[in-house]
Amino acid sequence: MSDIALRMEHVYKLFRKGEVFNSLRDLIPALSGKMFRQRELNGTDRREFWALQDLSFEVRRGEAFGIIGQNGAGKSTALKILSRVMKPTKGQIAVKGRVSALIEVTAGFHQDLTGRENIFLYGTIMGMNRREIATKLDEIIAFSGLEEFIDTPLKRYSSGMNARLGFSVAAHVKPDVLIVDEVLSVGDYAFQRKCVERMKQEIRNGAAVVFVSHNLRDIAEFCRSCVLLEKGRTIATGSAEDVISSYLKRFRLRNAEDANRAAVVISKVTVRDQNGECLRFRSGEKAWIDVELHAHARCSKLSVTLYIMGSEYQPIFDTSTERLGHGNFSLEAGDVYHCTFELDLNLANGIFHPSILVYRYDTQTEYDRWQPASTIHVSSEMDVRGAAHCFPKVIRREVRTASDSSLAVEAVSAPEFVARIDR
Amino acid sequence: MKEQLRELYRYRELLWMITYRDIKVRYKQSVIGLLWAILMPTIIVLSGVVVRFGFALASGKQLATAEIAAVAVKAVPWAFLVSSIRFSCNSLTSNNPLVTKIYFPKEIFPLAAVLASLFDFLVASAGLVPLLLVINRGWSFQIFWVPLLFVMMVSLASGIGMIVSAASLFFRDVKYLVDVGLTFAIFFTPVFYDAQMFGEKGQWLLLNPVAPILEGISGCIARQQFPDLSWLVYSFAFSMLALVGGYLFFKHLEPAFAESI
C-alpha cells in the first residue's frame, strides 16, 4: 500500500562479542596464531549472538509505532538499522522519504561553535539545506528559548540547553520518517510538553514515527501499535495496549518465579467493571479487583494489600483488607482465599498498575507480591494531568482592570469554559 | 557506485558545512588564527632553505634564487599533503557520535579534512606569490601545467585520506604508523632536494608518485621547464588509482563502521 512509510521484513542482526581486534598490534599475532591452529567449526561461533531475530513491522504515514523491551532487548539496534547506520545481517528494510533520527540529539554539535553555527551544522547533518535552515532559523531559535545565548559557544551551555537546541533543530526537519529514542526526557517539564506537542503535530502532518521509550505512558499515548522485544526476539506485536499488557505480564511472571514456593501465593488477580473483565476505564467509574490466594502451609495474621502505581511505578494509592477494618485472617495448607476490592477510579488520564501484596503486619513478612498485577488505562474527557482526578470546574472568573477599580466578574458554567479552551 | 556518487552529491552541503566547521574550529582554537596556515609551510620552506644552503656550502657554490623558489613551491604542496593525510586519518574516529548515530555518506569526513587542508594550502600559496615576485621567478606559459598537477595532488590526498581514515577506524594504531610514515616520508621525497641531484639514480626517487608532481610544480614555476611527460602520466595514473581505489575501499568498509568503531 502506498501510505506505508516504512517496512522491516524478517530483519536479523548478528553481533560479535568478546575478542575484537582494534589494533594491528593485536591482529598480526592473532592471525599468525590462527594459521597454525585448526579452523573453527562452521556455523554460529560462540562469540557471536543475535541482537535481533526476525523482526518485522510496518508503519503507515501519520502513525506512531512503539518499540519496548528491557535494556539489551535490541531496541537501539533496531533503530540503528532503521536509520541505516547499520546494515542488517539478513532481511529487508524499505523506507520512503527523508528519515530523521532523534537519537542523542546533541551528537552533531561542536562545542567550540556558537549556537547559531551549530543550528546550521546540525541542520545540514539532518538533511536540510542551508536555505531551508535560514528560513526556519528564527523559528528554531524561538522554539529552543535560547535567544539570549544563541551567539555563545556551546561549551558555555548546560547539558539541558544543549539538548534543547538539538531537539529544536530536529523538530524542524520535517521528516517523512521520524525515529525517536528516549529524547522526550530532555529539558524541563515545559520543554518536554512542547516536544510532545511537536511530535504529535508531525504525526498529524503525515510523518511516520518509530518511538522507543521505557516510559510506557508515552508509548500508550502516542502509539497505536507496538512491538515487544526480548533478547532480540519479538515477544509480542499488535495494538499498543495488548503489547504493554503482555510486557507487564512477563515482568510479573518473572517475579513470581523468584518468589519460589512460598507458603501463600497469589494465584489470580482480575480487574473488572460491572460487565466483566476489563482494562479500560473512564475516570470516576467503578472497578472491582478480585484476588485469589492459595495456601501451601499454615499461615496466620494475613492481610491483602492493594496498591496502585502510576505509569512510572510511583505509588499513588494503597490500602489493605486489614486497614479497611476486616482484621487479619489465617489459612491452612490447601485453603483457597478470595476477596474483592471495590474502587471508585478517580484517576486522571493515563495508565496505572494495580498491584497486590500478601503481608503479615506484626512480623513484617511478605508472602507474595504481584507488582503490577494488571495494567489499566483510564481516560477522561477533561484535560487534567497527574494521577488523581478531582473533577474540577471553573465556576467564577474575575478580571480587575488597572484603570477601573470596579470588578468585572464573570460567572461561567463549566462546559462553556472547556469549549473555550478547546478553541 | 554511480548511486553512491549521486548520494554524495546530494549531501554536498554537508561536505561544505563540515569543512567550514573544521576550518573555523581550527582557527578559533588558536591564538594566532589565520597565521597558522602560513606557519607550517613557512617552517618547512625555511628548513628547506637551510638544507639548500648547506648543499651550496658543501659544493662551494652560491645559493641560487631559483633554488629557493624551487624549495618554496615544493614545500607548500607537501605541507598540504601531510596535513590532509594526518587530519583525515583521525576524521572518522574523532566524529564517533556522528558515525554511529546518523546516516549520511561517511566519506564526507576524510574529504572535508582534505578540503580544510586545501584552505590552508590556498592561504599559504597566496603568501608565496609575493616571495616569487621578489625573487622574480615564476612567470612562463609552463604555469598552465600547475592546475593539472594540483588536481593530481588533491586526488592523491583524498584517496590516501579515505584509506587511512577507514583503516584507523578498525585499527587504532594505524594512526601511529601514518604519523611515522609522514615524518620520514620527506626524506624519500624530493622536497628539500631535487631528484636530478642524484643523476641517473634520481629515476628511482621518481617512483614515489608524489615526486613527479612536486618536481613538475617546481619545474614549471621555478625553472620554466616542461614537465617530464612519462613520469607525469605515471603519477596521474597513480593518483587516479588512489582516488578510485580509496573510494571503493572506503565504501566497501563503510557498512561496518557503526559497529566497529
Image (spheres, coloured by chain):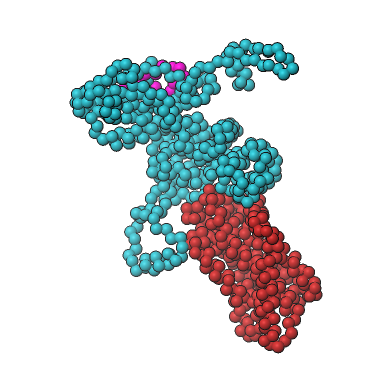
Q: Is residue A116 above or below residue A313?
A: below
Whole-percent x, y for residue A209 in the image: 53, 37
Residue found 32% across the figure and 65% down from its top: A38
Quarter the C terminus of chain A occupies: top right
Whole-percent x, y for residue B183 in the image: 58, 71
Whole-percent x, y for residue B237 in the image: 62, 70
Q: Is residue B18 above or below residue A317?
A: below
- Majority SS type along the magenta span: strand
User: Would you say B230 lies left or right of A317 here?
Assistant: right
Residue found 51% across the figure and 40% down from its top: A181
- The answer, for residue B225, to whether it is visible in the render is no
Look at the image and say whether residue A347 sits in the magenta stretch: no
Tell how many labels. 0
- The answer, for residue B135, to whether it is visible in the render is yes
- The shade of chain B is red
The magenta stretch spans which residues?
A: A275-292
Which one is nearer the viewer's eye here, A107 or A224? A107
Which one is nearer the viewer's eye here, B235 or B177? B177
- The shade of chain A is cyan
- Quadrant housing residue A29: bottom left
Whole-percent x, y for residue A273 in the image: 39, 18
Residue found 43% across the figure and 60% down from its top: A21
